[in-house]
């Protein structure tokens, strides 16, 4: 039951070119900083990345973008990254943008074993091009297929050696559902404790969904947009 690995370098063993990887986080909140940095040091390329957004130019998934390690980005928001815009417009990067709720539900469905579902968001827009549609209760819906990944990389506040995770406040965001949707889930945590120390009533992700866990270091917790009063 001990799923602890020494560090991020050991945690990413097995991630290869052209794999699909999910990364938890919302903006720069709750992102797996250590794992992303370790991936940026490798020669792995051609990744299909699934995340709410693609970080900023010099932080988070922005590191992988700068290194041209990402082939395709599946996300719901990409507005804070100039390099993302450049690669998109130049044709270097394939992008699939989704309504945020649809993205979240596609991931949750993937982790729950639900292959597809209907949702009204996006009907009649570019999001719906090529997708099956159907009317329910007088309203048109799009068929959305679930998302899974070869690896899911998440960040938690606390975790134990059995892989049970607790997220803190907004950092819960996409981490919880992504942990369920990866064939192999890597969790980095701020605090790692022995199994049995976490109150089971407050565990957000049961350890059954986590295959590797390690305690991260040197979290920057950067503010995405710093706004100060005059």
Image: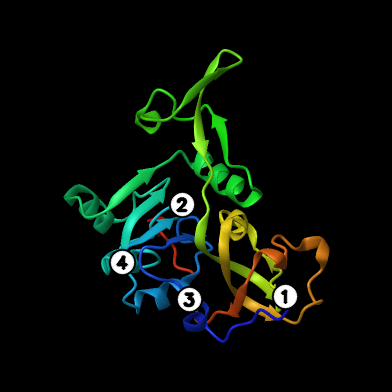
Q: Residue furthest bottom?
A: 6
State the CA–CA distance, disc 1 to disc 3.
Answer: 18 Å
In the picture, measured across the screen, residue 135 lies left or right of residue 81, that is right
In this view, 162 is above or below 7? above
> Is 86 or 72 nearer to us in this picture?
72
State the CA–CA distance, disc 1 to disc 4.
Answer: 31 Å
State the CA–CA distance, disc 3 to disc 4.
Answer: 15 Å
Q: Single out the mark in the foreground, 2 or 1.
A: 1
Marked residue nearer the N-terminal end (1 or 4): 4
* Residue at the spot 59% in from the left edge and 80% down from the top edge: 215
Contact, mark 1 vs mark 3 (Cβ under 8 Å): no
Q: Residues within 10 Å of mark 1 (few under 14, many from 20)?
A: many
What residue did someone put label 1 on? Answer: 162
Marked residue nearer the N-terminal end (2 or 1): 2
- Asked which secondary structure carries label 2, the reply is loop
- Asked which secondary structure carries label 3, the reply is loop
Marked residue nearer the N-terminal end (2 or 3): 3
Q: Which dot marks residue 2?
A: none
Q: Could you tell me residue 75's position as x and y percent?
A: 42, 49
State the CA–CA distance, disc 2 to disc 4.
Answer: 18 Å
Image quarter hosting the N terminus: bottom right
Image quarter hosting the C terminus: bottom left
What residue did someone put label 4 on? Answer: 69
């Amino acid at each position: 039951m001990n799923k602890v690995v020494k560090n991020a370098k050991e945690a990413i063993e097995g991630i290869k070119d052209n794999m699909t990887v999910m990364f938890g986080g919302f903006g720069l909140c709750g992102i797996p900083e250590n794992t992303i940095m370790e991936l940026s040091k490798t020669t792995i390329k051609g990744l299909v990345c699934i995340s709410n957004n693609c970080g900023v130019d010099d932080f988070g998934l922005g590191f992988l973008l700068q290194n041209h390690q990402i082939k395709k980005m599946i996300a719901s928001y990409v507005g804070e990254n100039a390099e993302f815009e450049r690669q998109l417009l130049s044709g270097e990067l394939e992008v699939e943008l989704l309504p945020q709720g649809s993205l979240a539900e596609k991931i949750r469905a993937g982790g729950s074993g639900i292959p597809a579902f209907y949702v009204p968001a996006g009907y009649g827009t570019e999001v719906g091009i090529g997708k099956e549609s159907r009317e329910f209760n007088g309203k048109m819906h799009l068929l959305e297929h679930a998302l899974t990944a070869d690896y899911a990389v998440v960040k938690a506040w606390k975790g134990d050696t059995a892989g049970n995770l607790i997220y803190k406040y907004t950092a819960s965001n996409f981490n919880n559902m992504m942990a369920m949707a990866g064939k192999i889930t890597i969790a980095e945590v701020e605090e790692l404790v022995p199994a049995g120390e976490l109150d089971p009533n407050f565990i957000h992700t049961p350890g059954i969904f986590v295959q590797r866990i390690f305690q991260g270091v040197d979290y920057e917790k950067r503010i995405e947009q710093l706004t100060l009063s005059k």
